[in-house]
Amino acid sequence: MKPLKPNDKRLNVAEAYLDADEIDALTDVVRDGWITMGPRVDAFEKAFAARSDAQAAVAVSSCTAGLHLVLAALGIGLGDEVLVPSMTFVATVNAILYVGAKPLFVDISGPEDASISLDDARSKMSERTRAAIVVHYAGSLVPGDAWRRFAEAEGLLLIEDAAHAAGVPGAGSFGDAAVFSFYGNKNMTTAEGGMVTARDPDLLQCVRTLRSHGMTSGTFERHHKVAPRYDVTMLGWNYRMDELRAAIGLVQLARLEGWNRRRRELVDCYFDALATYCPQVRIAAGPPGQRPVHILPALLPDGIQRDDVAASLYDDGIQTSFHYPPVHQLDLYRRLCPHQYLPLTEEFGNRQITLPLHPGMTEGQVKQVARSLARCVETLSLVEEGVVL
Ligand SMILES: *Cc1c(COP(=O)(O)O)cnc(C)c1O
């Protein structure tokens, strides 16, 4: 479980866990000599599908690539609109632009609920709206039944950005397609990589074809045939996963459930520790009752300078991060989609701070974070009130 190369003493927001098993898996690939998409990618797809209650899965080079492929395979393009939260990583929204469609930014559900608001989504729709992308922020699932009903009633395609929710039961269960990420800071990693699951086998087959230039057969199949032939049936991309990454993915996948269990224990510990030491700071992720499992998003009291909190925690050896700067406020999107006003997202985006969460942490470290946070929030509050220290 420990990283082979221990990091500096700082407590990081996220940490990848790789050990001798990943080294062995990589060595096996190199020894076998087949390094591009082949039997290990196939095995990884099957193992991932089995663990996510999906019929099948398609491995891709990243979650971003997977989102692009899903939108393309669903036929979303020029003139279409796609509902999407602004409280997400920019890649979710970029994928909409890749296919020439227009993002419709949707606010979050409440001051402490960063999940995409169904009511706001309904109010933003027009005749051109074809799809909605929901994000399982922090690994807290959006209410799947409600979103499924909404999509069916409105004739919308529904896509789950499940980048935060690998191994979370129910993720990928209600959308037309779901995309997972295996980037280095996610619940499991292949360094770079992603996975697509879908309800409709034809849709998944289309994603499979688009992943590799729109070709009717893969390199591995052609390599093992006497007369290699292929046709190209649609405009695709090179978004393949390779055998080295799939080999790491197989090792990581076997550990995912245990890691997520440990993450949940640590999140429970965070709830207790913050309530004890620092009740002014609240944990905010998804809908009420849904606890985070990927990142630990905390909501600072109104009026506290967040950068000062981050600097003070840093001095105590604790790294923090922000999830996320709202996408509609990023320079590119301010230019492309001007005059957006998402009050809850903007407020959340100003007050949110992400605290360390990864399965190798101890309860003692969680308490240390809570105490450090309590100290600096108290000091900064006094400064705000003009007390000379
Ligand atoms: C990480 C992330 C992505 C992108 O994943 P990659 O695998 O790095 O492309 C997309 N959406 C969300 C919400 C993410 O956190």
Image: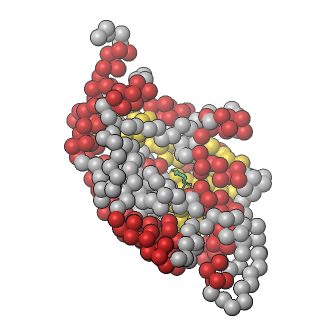
Query: Quick one: quadrant of the C terminus?
Result: top left
Q: Please provide percent x and percent y for residue 378.
A: 29, 22
Q: Residue at x 53, y 61 (%)?
A: 193
37 relative to 364, above or below: below
The image quadrant of residue 208 is bottom right
Query: Would residue 5 be visible to someone looking at this image?
Result: yes
Query: Would residue 143 be visible to someone looking at this image?
Result: no
**Of 358 and 17, which appears nearest the observer?**
17
Left or right of residue 336: residue 323: left
372 relative to 77, above or below: above
The image quadrant of residue 168 is bottom left
Q: Residue at x 67, y 52 (%)?
A: 96
Q: Please provide percent x and percent y for residue 133.
A: 59, 54
Query: Quick one: quadrant of the N terminus?
Result: bottom left
Q: Please provide percent x and percent y for residue 258.
A: 31, 63
Q: Residue at x 44, y 35 (%)?
A: 352
Q: Please provide percent x and percent y for residue 239.
A: 63, 64
Tally of numbered discs = 0
**Of 209 and 319, which appears nearest the observer?**
319
- Find the residue positioned furthest to the front: 31
Q: Residue at x 42, y 59 (%)?
A: 188
